[in-house]
Amino acid sequence: MIRLLCLTLIIALCAALPARADELHLKNGDRITGATTSLAGGTLLFKAIGGDLKVAWTDVASLSIDQPMLVTIGTAAPVSATFAPDAAGNLVMLPGGPVAITSIVALARPQPAWIVAGGAGAGVVQSAGNTRINNVRINGDLAATSGRNAYHAGLLVTHANDRGIETARNWDVIGKYDRFVTTRTYTNANLDFTNDRFQDFDLRTALGAGLGYALLATPQAKLNADAGIAWVHENFRSIPDDSYAAAHESVNFSWAFMPDRMQVFHLHDGYFGSNKLFVRMQNGVRVGLAKGFVTTIEEDLLYNRRPAPGLRTTDRTFSLTLGYRF
């Protein structure tokens, strides 16, 4: 039984690797099959059956790669190539010819034309009997990056009633486009459409443009801040409509302090007019469950310094949702 279990595990591990694998030969005689990840700073990252390896490039005797990689030789610009060792130990690049392994200073996987990430979630609260509550909350976001261009869209819908009486009904759609002029600095355009019956909005439209800066940009932590000008139009249900120019500022922060397990996030947008101000803020913790599924605890705050008559300036919503991230 134990042998059968071990054999099953070995087959499963082998199946996790591509049918065609790279071959890494070390100077001590070891030969390892797997997939080349990258070479930078004199260290080769190699994904083998037993796990990820870090190998000093000086310990590598030869390397065979059957998938295109971006190869940097000396001070030349990276080129896309595959290669295998010849009898002398040099690498024969395709396209190209023999190259001494010591002249290769960097390897990297080519980036796809588009990098897409996002997710969606939903939370439902329902009770019957003495208390009859029905709450539904749906959210989703999508981010797409291509070269210097980054696009982001988000959707949030909330509906709640208590004993058949509606207590919340709103939706919010946001969109943003960033054009990076350097690795950190970008120009942007943004929009925000809000409908909220209990804030008396049929539709509030905010359109803006400005400049931004990526203060943090690592796999674990991201912090972007931007500011600019905006135009806001408020279409009310019971009072006259209004339009005004405003200054706009936005902050987007996320920190995966336990990668693939736990992430905290903060997002806010503020629009400052001559006699008006509104701020939309989202704070939360996202906990990874398994295979992309997450649960999110979130607090949303919406502040309006001059609400419609009889309404409060601040609305808060607490939610617990189950979702999927990719």
Image (cartoon, rainbow, N blue to C red):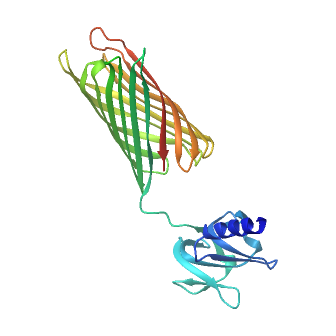
Q: Is residue 109 visible?
A: yes
Instruction: Specify whether 42 is left or right of 263.
Output: right
Which residue is depicted at the point 51% across and 83% down? 95
Residue 43: tell me if it is visible: no
Instruction: Tell me which residue sits at (45%, 63%) in the image.
Output: 112
The front one of 326 and 128 is 128
Horizontal arrangement in the rendering, residue 234 relative to residue 87 (left or right): left
Residue 59: give x, y in percent of width and height. 77, 73
Between 54 and 293, the one lying in front of the other is: 293
Location of the N terminus by quadrant is bottom right
Examine the image and state in which quarter residue 307 appears: top left
- Location of residue 30 with respect to 201 vertically, above or below: below
Q: Residue furthest bottom?
A: 87
* Image location of residue 147, percent across then percent down: 42, 58
* Residue at (53, 83) in percent of width and height: 94
| Residue 320 image offset from top left, x and y in percent | 49, 30
Q: Is residue 213 above or below residue 279?
A: below
Give above or below for 229 relative to 53. above
Against 12, is 229 above or below? Answer: above
Q: Nearer the viewer, residue 171 or 6?
A: 6
Return the x and y of residue 38 as percentages of the image width and height.
Answer: 62, 66
Question: Position of 163 compared to 241: left or right?
Answer: right
| Count of numbered tags | 0
Furthest-right residue in this view: 28
**Which residue is most to the left?**
240
Q: Quadrant of the rendered structure where residue 124 is?
A: top left
